[in-house]
Image (cartoon, rainbow, N blue to C red):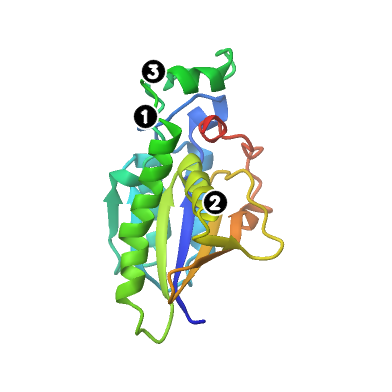
């Protein structure tokens, strides 16, 4: 079955909040020095991908990452979309995850936090409206279209897990859905029947040998989803 669209989901580069275990949610935190370097490296890794469209969360850590990638694709403009933001963590935003006790319990009871079902629905609605509708319009194309999406760890993990649970996605053999670290690349192929396959998840091979400080493995926003 023909592959119509290949979607590249890229998590933004590192921020000081990531490094310090601070819950960001929808706070607009900038990339730190490591994050800027990570964004540059993922841009180099994707420089030969013939992107036809680019979307990004409107939070600066995501848009700055998109800009680093699109530096190699000067004819493309990034389309900022609020729907691609991280989960709104309400009153928990800006607080240290380590300092909070029973964080998961707080998430489930704090009415200022975007609910898990609402967050998952937001992610899937974005996918249906932005990716699948575009795929449908491209069904007669001879070659797959390549779409760049820069977003957040919690959003990417929730989107992929929810689509797999609803059987809109499958995972290719050997693919493990695990943590989505800074500047990692996840690739989903969508066929003419609008069914998807995750062919790569959370890949950070572009960071190997870069002499960066220890990569932050835990995403405190994602672990609360």
Mark 2 or mark 3, whichever is nearer to me: 2
Horizontal side of 92 relative to 182 (left or right) equals: left
Residue located at (55% from left, 55% from top)? 164
Name the spot of residue 26 as percent of width and height, x first. 37, 32
The answer to which quarter of the image holds residue 52 is: bottom left
Which of disc 1 and disc 3 is earlier in sequence? 1
Q: Residues within 10 Å of mark 3 (few under 14, many from 20)?
A: some
Observer-nearest residue: 124 or 24? Answer: 124
User: Badge 3 is on which residue?
Assistant: 91
Residue located at (51% from left, 63% from top)? 188
Which of disc 3 and disc 2 is earlier in sequence? 3
In the current view of this chain or complex, which residue is farthest to the front? 166
Count of numbered circles in the view: 3
Observer-nearest residue: 131 or 68? Answer: 131
Mark 2 or mark 1, whichever is nearer to me: 2
Mark 2 falls on what kind of element?
helix
Residue located at (45% from left, 34% from top)? 116
Mark 3 or mark 1, whichever is nearer to me: 3
Location of residue 94 with respect to 48 vertically, above or below: above
In the current view of this chain or complex, which residue is farthest to the right? 174
- Residue 27, label in figure: 1
Rounded to the nearest angstrom, the CA distance separating label 2 from label 3 is: 29 Å
Q: Are marks 2 and 3 in contact (CB under 8 Å)?
A: no
Viewer can see residue 168: yes
Location of residue 1 with respect to 183 vertically, above or below: below
Mark 1 falls on what kind of element?
loop
Rounded to the nearest angstrom, the CA distance separating label 3 from label 1 is: 11 Å
Viewer can see residue 74: no
Rounded to the nearest angstrom, the CA distance separating label 2 from label 1 is: 29 Å
Location of residue 89 with respect to 85 vertically, above or below: above
Which of disc 1 and disc 2 is earlier in sequence? 1
User: Badge 2 is on which residue?
Assistant: 165
């Amino acid at each position: 079955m023909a592959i119509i669209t290949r979607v590249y989901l890229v998590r933004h580069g590192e921020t000081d909040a990531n490094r310090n275990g601070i819950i960001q949610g929808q706070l607009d935190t900038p990339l730190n020095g490591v994050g800027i370097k990570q964004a540059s490296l993922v841009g180099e890794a994707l420089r030969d991908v013939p992107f036809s469209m680019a979307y990004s969360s409107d939070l600066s850590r995501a848009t700055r990452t998109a800009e680093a990638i699109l530096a190699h694709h000067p004819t493309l403009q990034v389309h900022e979309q609020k729907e691609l933001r991280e989960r709104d963590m309400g009153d928990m935003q800006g607080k240290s995850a380590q300092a909070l006790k029973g964080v998961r319990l707080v998430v489930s009871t704090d009415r200022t936090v975007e609910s898990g079902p609402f967050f998952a629905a937001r992610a899937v609605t974005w996918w249906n409206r932005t990716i699948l509708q575009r795929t449908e319009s491209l069904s007669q194309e001879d070659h797959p279209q390549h779409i760049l999406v820069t977003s957040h760890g919690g959003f990417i993990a929730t989107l992929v897990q929810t689509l797999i649970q609803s059987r809109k996605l499958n995972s290719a053999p050997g693919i493990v859905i695990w943590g989505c670290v800074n500047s990692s690349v996840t690739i989903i192929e969508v066929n003419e029947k609008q069914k998807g396959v995750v062919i790569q998840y959370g890949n950070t091979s572009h960071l190997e040998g870069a002499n960066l400080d220890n990569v932050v493995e835990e995403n405190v926003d994602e672990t609360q989803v």
